[in-house]
Image (cartoon, grey):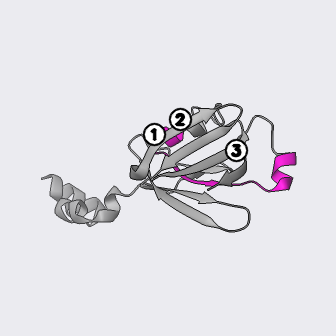
Amino acid sequence: MSDSVLERFTGTRSEELANDSRACDAGPPDNLGAFGYLRGIRDRAVMLELQRRDGSIMAIGYSWLERVEYDPSDGITLSASGRRIRIRGRNLNVVDRPQVQLFQAIVRHRITWIREGTNDEHMTTDEHLTIIESIEW
């Protein structure tokens, strides 16, 4: 009975939907300026993409993260496969948008990308928002 209702409204049978890998993909992340955030309650990122101003990009698998540390004076440090990655900036562990904190979201695998801001963004962005000044690896 449920298949006939599903077919009638979507043209898709439940077996086809269950076998379609796209049905399980998370939607696009919210662009919060300094980072991309998966809002869905069950959404989890597989990898974290780190984007520098100079165009270089590194992506690390969340499964390789051994430790994530936050020090207000030093920023966020990611330890992954013997490599240390340092993210420096402002408001790295404060509520940036309703219920969104960069550090907490990394710990929960909700961040898909982080990017360094431009010098103009550092000067013109609201002082309460998260700004990434540097990413070092």
List x then y, in percent, for residue 88.
70, 44
What range of the chain is rendered magenta? Answer: 105-124
| CA neighbours of label 3 inside 10 A, class few (<14), some (14 to 19), many (20+) | many
In the image, 1 versus 98, the foreground residue is: 98
Q: Kindly report the distance in space between the C-alpha atoms of the residues bearing marks 2 and 3.
A: 15 Å
Assess whether residue 51 is covered by the magenta stretch: no
For residue 34, above or below residue 107: below
Q: Which callout, 3 or 1, points to the residue nearer the camera?
A: 3
Q: Kindly report the distance in space between the C-alpha atoms of the residues bearing marks 2 and 1.
A: 6 Å
| Visible residue check, residue 63 | yes
Q: Which residue is mark 3?
A: 88
Q: Secondary structure at mark 2?
A: helix
In the picture, measured across the screen, residue 30 lies left or right of residue 54, that is left
Q: Say which residue appears at 21% left-offset and 55% top-offset.
A: 5
Residues at circles 2 and 1 in contact by the CB criterion of under 8 Å: yes
Q: Residue furthest left?
A: 1
List x then y, in percent, for residue 115.
66, 55
Tell me which label, 3 or 1, sits earlier in the chain.
3
Q: Which residue is mark 2?
A: 104
Under mark 2, the amino acid is Gln
Which quadrant holds residue 113?
bottom right
The C terminus sits in image quarter: bottom right
Under mark 1, the amino acid is Arg
List x then y, in percent, for residue 15.
17, 62
In the picture, measured across the screen, residue 40 lies left or right of residue 119, that is left
Under mark 3, the amino acid is Arg
Q: Secondary structure at mark 3?
A: strand
In the image, 132 versus 21, the foreground residue is: 132
Q: Say which residue appears at 48% left-offset and 57% top-offset.
A: 60
Q: Say which residue appears at 65% left-offset and 46% top-offset.
A: 87
Q: Which residue is mark 1?
A: 108
Q: Say which residue appears at 73% left-offset and 62% top-offset.
A: 53
